[in-house]
Amino acid sequence: MDKFINNNGIKIHFQEFSGDGPVLILLPGLTANCRVFEGLLAAGLGQACHVVSMDLRGRGISDKPASGYSLAEHAEDVRHLIDRFRGREIIPVGHSFGGLVAVWLCAHYPELCERLILLDLAIETTDPKVVELLKPSLGRLDKTFASEKVYLDTMQLAPYLFGCWDEHLEAYFRADVRQISGGGVKPRSSRENIGACIEAVLDEDWPELFRSLKTSTLLVNAVSDYSAAGPLVPAD
């Protein structure tokens, strides 16, 4: 079910799935929207747990302010959402950039969560290969597509998907774009806002934040190839 919270005038969108068990706060990656987790929900996550999947600020149908993309501001949005579930066990589940938001949150507010799940992220990504591998995904933000179908066809052929395509990925990519005049579509996220998020990541001392983390943490890393260059996150 689509819902919204308002944090200091910024409207944040989330979807809620009322299952049993702890409250999982799902935080998408750098340019992703809340529907990126639909495959997990279809596999039964929404029955095993009470799932809340967020559109981070600047993504999906959350507000997109011109500024305000620090890790602290992202984390404050999450903390504002967690307030709705006080008294229940809260487990942030962060993918990539969303994982960094979760680490920042738990490092600064250790009382909020006893457990944390991180999906495919690293303390540092100094490997230039990572930047090169992300360029095709980031490149779509600059483009206008003639129609939703053209956009979906383009994404289906993206090298980093390796031909993997199903109804869950299609739903995620449909939510990734907005209609514009003339019948075309354009990604909802802007390169400027995502660039501000990248700058915010570079401003943080991640080794120190990870050292200070007291929350019991499960790290899940993808081991299969991303494009043809091996896993996105190096083993070390």
Image (cartoon, rainbow, N blue to C red):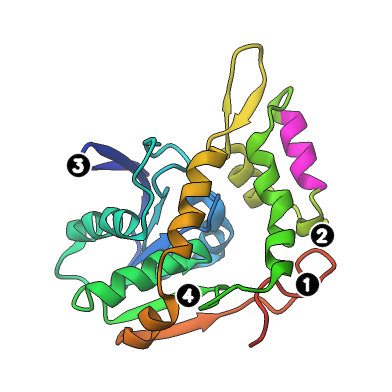
* Residue type at the position of mark 1: Asp
The quarter of the picture where the C terminus appears is bottom right
Labelled disc at residue 225: 1
* Residue type at the position of mark 2: Phe
- Asked if the residue under mark 4 is in contact with the one under mark 3, i.e. CB atoms within 8 Å, the reply is no
Structural crowding at the residue carrying mark 4, measured as other residues with C-alpha within 10 Å and reported as few (<14), some (14–19) or many (≥20): many
- Asked if the residue under mark 1 is in contact with the one under mark 4, i.e. CB atoms within 8 Å, the reply is no
Disc 1 or disc 2, which is closer to the eye? Answer: 1
**In the rendered structure, which disc, 3 or 4, sits on the residue that comes first in sequence?**
3
Name which residue lies at 55% across and 59% down: 42
Q: Quadrant of residue 183?
A: top right
Question: Residue 89, percent across and down?
Answer: 24, 74
Q: Nearer the viewer, residue 194 or 204?
A: 204
Please name the residue that numbered disc 2 is placed on.
162
Please name the residue that numbered disc 3 is placed on.
8
Mark pair 4, 1: CA separation? 19 Å
Please name the residue that numbered disc 4 is placed on.
118
**Magenta region:** 149-157
The quarter of the picture where the N terminus appears is top left
* Residue type at the position of mark 3: Asn
In the rendered view, tell whether residue 128 sits above or below residue 4.
below
